[in-house]
Amino acid sequence: MNKTIAEEFNQKFYTVYNVIKNNRSGFYLLNKIYELYSILINSEHVVTVEEHKSIDNLILELRVIFWNKQSYDDWAKENRKKYDEIVKSFTKVNDSEFIIFERYTSLEGYTSQFPYTIYPDKNSLFNWTLIPYHKNFVIKDICPLGKIQEYTGNGNFNLAANIKDYGARFIKERTSEIIRRPPSQQATKTGNFPRIVAYSFDQSIQTLMYTAPWLYRKLTKLTYDVEQLASKYILDCDNAAVLIGHNSMGQELTLHTHRLSDELRYSFTIITRLTFEDKGAFVKFYDPIKDDDPNLSLYYSNPLLLIDSVKNDISKGFNLESRASMLVFSASYIPHLVMYDNDIYLFYVYDNVTFKPGMFELIVQNSHIKYFEKESVDKRLYYQLIA
């Protein structure tokens, strides 16, 4: 017999359902609910917290998802007193004719009326997920800072020309031994974006320090940990950036290639997925550009020219389903784009890198997706999940 999504979900995780039913519009326990949030989302034992409301606004289900039953037991032991106080305040409302509070676990055979989300396992990089409240902070308060703009002088900016859709792009500050090399001499005036400017990602997320301290701490630690992971693989790069992907910024990150280097080098990207409401953004790749293409040096600064050049070509790609992954490819020669969805992604991009001895070979060995293997060794693509 085939298992339902709910059955598969409940076997993988341990879930506690806090269900509040109200006989008239509105809820009276929101303060207590947010107190419960505060002791849940900071715990390493919790996958995430989901808040579901019925269309008529009369049923609220606060779904707390733990990694397993042992995680729940450990969390309960650490937070027993505070949790008991909150649950007690919930159960008191059962005396009201307006509100009924019910609590179930995944071991009790409870079936929710709301849809389920399948979350990937935790990994060595990070194990948390943005709740909607913090997702909205990223969309409203961080993404606009990274909108790709051209500086026109006198303190004025315009949206960048020759770009189909947008993303949020930031400079990645150095927080490890990875060296940032001076700009390539091949990045000439005709093949570069000299008037495109960007904020530092590290500085941008500091703006959340007081308005969303949890998000500030999480993004800061993740960004530091990503660079530490990258430093295990690479010695240096031409530049490093952080891109945020979400469909609020358009349908896709425009088709593009990266800036040419003095030598043909790979780009190294660590991709992190912070929410799991959709099927996963789709990354698309076209065959590597030929060395004798007369427009090779122009494609970086003129994506519309690149789009026109591949309009009749066949692409290949895959969805970003995992929590964290690693992409290594010849980004200067392989045209690529990301088709956004309703999830939040951070792309930590290191361009034109030098690998530490043996690390490129390790990436090739561990990658489960490999494209363009008939091309020269410098024009291939490798993708692997981070365990």
Image (tube, helix red, strand yellow):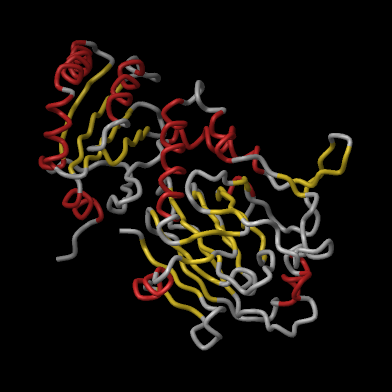
Task: Please report the residue visible at 75 percent of the width from the left and 82 percent of the height from the top.
Answer: 293
168 over 387 or under it: above or below: above
Task: Please report the residue visible at 34 percent of the width from the left and 14 percent of the height from the top.
Answer: 28
The residue nearer to you, when weighing 22 against 381, is 381
Task: Please report the residue visible at 75 percent of the width from the left and 63 percent of the height from the top.
Answer: 187
Q: Position of residue 25 (x, y in %)?
A: 40, 20
Q: Position of residue 178 (x, y in %)?
A: 51, 53
The residue nearer to you, when weighing 163 against 172, is 172
280 over 372 or under it: above or below: above
Q: How many marks?
A: 0
| View extreme (right): residue | 154
User: Can you tell which quarter of the image residue 299 is in?
Assistant: bottom right
Q: Position of residue 189 (x, y in %)?
A: 83, 61
Task: Please report the residue visible at 60 percent of the width from the left and 68 percent of the height from the top.
Answer: 331
User: Can you tell which quarter of the image residue 52 is in?
Assistant: top left
In this rendering, does residue 133 appear at all?
Answer: no
In this rendering, does residue 319 appear at all?
Answer: yes
Q: Is residue 107 left or right of residue 283?
A: left
Q: Position of residue 49 (x, y in %)?
A: 32, 35
290 over 115 or under it: above or below: below
Q: Quadrant of the C terminus?
A: bottom left
